[in-house]
Amino acid sequence: QLLLEAFRVGVKEFLPQPLTRQDVEPALARFEERFAGKASGLEMQAGKVIAVLGVRGGVGASTVATNLAVSVQQARHQDPVALVDLDVYGGELRLFLDLPASQGLTHLTKDISRLDETILRSTLVRHQSGLQFLASGCEAYDGFTFEPGSMMRVTSLLRSIHRYVFIDCGHILDPSVREVLDSADQVIVVTTLSLPAIRRTKRLLEVLFAARYPAGKIALVVNRYEKDQKDLVAETETLLGFHMAGLIPNDYESASGAINHGK
């Protein structure tokens, strides 16, 4: 809890006890760099964090997160864009991008007191589009959990060096995902128009509304939309009391082929 509060008020460095020269000198050097950047007006404005959350497994949240991130990178090629795989229950975003396995989040969060921009940059993997990718580092059934405050620290560092940060949060609201949702500028909820998905959507929206996020922070997107579902969309909006922000047409063959070929 103390770490969470420290991150929220802007703490950027942690020095373990007892103090040593090799810990203090790099921390002071990083402080000097940040101060010089502010004084000269060269410090980049904090980036925007977009969390993508599925209402259940299999609705296509990872496909949406990946394609959004790559599309933004291609459209704004001079802006640094990052994509993070936070699905610790078997996230496979690296396969979507045809990238090699990497340590990712599990490596970064082993000791968040020592985590800095240099370590973060060395862990990111560059995609051919220019996108910077951060893997989860987890394998399915590992049972890995992050220490409290870890994802808030990682997210803060990512937004300090990227204009846009997209985070695939999977579909389970564990503490690390909640940290990301709290600090995100926008939460994109991905659903489909199947009855089980609609039921889960209603419950998830209730949980997110209870968090009292600012108006407009939550955007609901329907994936695999069919043209004959226009009336169903209207009925679903009435049931949820929430308007859809977007409809993604169903093109399962193209989406499946893209995943299988890493494109």
Image (tube, rainbow, N blue to C red):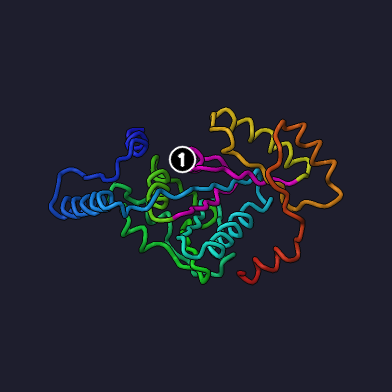
Start-end of magenta stretch: 163-192
Q: Which residue is mark 1?
A: 183
Q: What SS does tag 1 mark?
A: helix
**Which residue sits at x=77%, y=51%?**
225
Residue 162 falls in image quadrant? bottom left
Which of these two is toward me, 125 or 195?
125
Query: Does 183 sit left or right of 236 as displayed?
Result: left
Residue at 26% x, 45% y is 13
The residue at the point 46 percent across, 59 percent down is 134
Label 1 crowd (10 A; few <14 / some 14-19 / many >=20) = some
Q: Residue furthest left?
A: 21
Is 168 one of the magenta-colored residues?
yes
Residue 255 within the magenta-colored segment of the rendering: no
Q: Looking at the rendering, in which quadrant would you find the C terminus?
A: bottom right
Residue at position x 76%, y 65% in the image = 253
Amino acid of disc 1: Ser
Name the spot of residue 78 as percent of width and height, x first: 47, 64
In the rendering, at what x and y percent does residue 35 appear?
A: 24, 49
Q: Position of residue 79 (x, y in %)?
A: 46, 60
Quadrant of image for the N terminus: top left
Say left or right for 43 vs 135.
left
Q: How many marks?
A: 1
Q: Position of residue 63 (x, y in %)?
A: 63, 57
Judging depth in this view, the residue of 133 and 103 nearest the camera is 133
On screen, 34 above or below 76?
Answer: above
